[in-house]
Image (cartoon, rainbow, N blue to C red):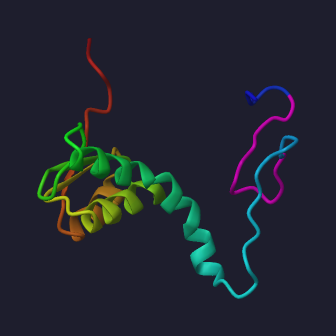
Amino acid sequence: MTYYADRFPYIVGGWAEYMYLPPNAWVYKVPDYFPVELTALSELFVVTAILDRARELAAHGGKGFHSGDTVVIQGSGAIGMMAVAKARLLGAGKVIALDTSPMKLEMKAEGRMLSLKPLAKRRW
């Protein structure tokens, strides 16, 4: 199913109070004993699973990253910060963060990683 912002079912945001689920959608019930704080982080871990895949590909001779390799993360929002943490957990050497927000880059720099601000406007 394709979703559009200008027609039904409109925006299907996971962070919204309510969201539209198409028929036969997979829904996972979080057990009552599971801490709410960890439940909130679960989506961030799912989105950053691509790093696990990159690490796995490298282990089998494919393209990906090996222990000690430099990893570049574009964006320093919640997902970007989680990607930085996960890259470190998976053995990345140097982690480079890209963002246009000075505040976010400062936070990244405090985490002992190289923070770079790309050009705000592309010149062709």
- Residue 34: give x, y in percent of width and height: 66, 83
Residue numbers of the magenta segment? 8-20
In-image side of 37 versus 117 (left or right): right
Relative to 30, say whether 91 is above or below: above
- Name the side, left or right, on which 54 lies relative to 96: right
Q: How many marks?
A: 0
The quarter holding residue 38 reads bottom right
Name the residue at 14% across, 57% down. 94
Residue 117 magenta-drawn? no
Q: Is residue 26 visible?
A: yes
Q: Residue furthest front?
A: 60
Residue 116 showing in the rendered view: no
Q: Nearer the viewer, residue 56 or 74?
A: 56
Q: What residue do we see at 76% from left, 29% from top?
A: 1
Q: Is residue 19 magenta?
A: yes
Residue 39 lies, in percent from the top left, at 63, 73
Q: Is residue 74 found left or right of 13 in the rendered image? A: left
At which x and y percent is residue 35?
A: 63, 84
Q: Residue at x 32, y 26 (%)?
A: 121
Q: Quadrant of residue 119?
A: top left
The quarter in which the C terminus is drawn is top left
Q: Nearer the viewer, residue 65 or 71?
A: 65
Magenta: main secondary structure: loop
